[in-house]
Image (cartoon, grey):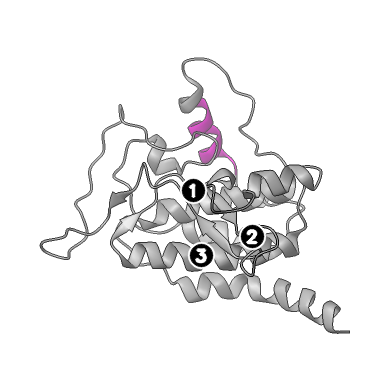
């Protein structure tokens, strides 16, 4: 962490706790690429959130490059011996991750797979734009249960109101993925390209 710059959480705070959809789209493309590389190595991160994405050191050539840190909750989605996807399991007493950004499957104690990192990324992006997620504010021992219930009850339309269409498309795509499904990373990235092209055309005009 000493070798890198501010986290997306820091940047979001600096920007007055709100980020432009275009900026979030740029982050989405970088973050999906990073997760694809990690997944190719057979691991899922397990704790995707704004605090775990850091930019390069300010003033360096990499100051706008995104990095993913904290692999403390990483697990294997691919068996090292067989190369096959790990088996599906569900242990409701086991929760891994951060309640605010965790996937519904993580709340339910299901074995982590690639879809969970991407669902957490969707919540991260929506949070960066809107500054709040519908399930924030719950307290007490059953907080995780209440948050999970709210996540399951909140439609992508409601979640992504006031967000450009690509964010809803991304959320729908990743929350409908099967346990062992291989994400179509290129397609997920393509959702955001129209927003980024808009930014570039403004910059070059």
Classify mark 1: helix, strand or loop: loop
| 104 versus 140 height, above or below | below
Instruction: Answer whether labels 2 and 3 touch (C-beta < 8 Å).
Output: no
Classify mark 3: helix, strand or loop: helix
Which comes before the other along the chain, label 1 or label 2? Answer: 1
Q: Calculate the distance from the C-alpha at mark 1 to the C-alpha at mark 2.
A: 17 Å
Q: Calculate the distance from the C-alpha at mark 3 to the C-alpha at mark 1.
A: 11 Å
Which comes before the other along the chain, label 3 or label 1? Answer: 3
**Res 48 label:** 1
**Residue 109 placement, left or right of 186:** left
Q: What crowding class fits label 2: few (fewer than 14 Cα within 10 Å), some (14-19), or many (20 or more)?
A: many
Picture coordinates of residue 21 (x, y %)? 74, 60
Q: At x 55% / y 52%, what residue is drawn?
A: 53
Q: Which residue was labeled with disc 3?
A: 32
Q: Which residue was labeled with disc 2?
A: 167
Q: Closer to the camera: disc 1 or disc 2?
A: 1
Residue found farthest to the bottom: 205
Q: Magenta residues, as a range?
A: 146-154
Instruction: Answer whether labels 1 and 2 touch (C-beta < 8 Å).
Output: no
């Amino acid at each position: 962490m000493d070798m890198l710059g501010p986290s997306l959480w820091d940047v979001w705070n600096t920007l007055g706790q709100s980020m432009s959809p275009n900026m979030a789209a740029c982050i989405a493309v970088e973050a999906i690429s990073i997760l694809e590389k990690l997944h190719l190595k057979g691991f899922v991160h397990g704790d995707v959130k704004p605090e775990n994405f850091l930019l390069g050191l300010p003033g360096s050539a990499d100051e706008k490059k995104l990095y993913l840190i904290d692999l403390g909750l990483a697990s294997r989605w691919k068996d090292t011996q067989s190369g096959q996807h790990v088996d599906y399991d569900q242990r409701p007493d086991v929760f891994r991750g951060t309640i605010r950004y965790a996937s519904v499957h993580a709340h339910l104690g299901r074995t982590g797979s690639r879809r969970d990192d991407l669902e957490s990324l969707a919540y991260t992006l929506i949070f960066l734009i809107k500054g709040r997620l519908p399930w924030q504010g719950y307290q007490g021992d059953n907080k995780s249960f209440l948050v999970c219930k709210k996540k399951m009850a909140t439609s992508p339309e409601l979640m992504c109101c006031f967000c450009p269409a690509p964010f809803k498309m991304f959320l729908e795509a990743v929350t409908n993925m099967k346990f062992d499904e291989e994400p179509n990373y290129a397609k997920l990235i393509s959702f955001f390209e129209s927003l980024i092209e808009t930014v570039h055309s403004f910059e070059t005009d």
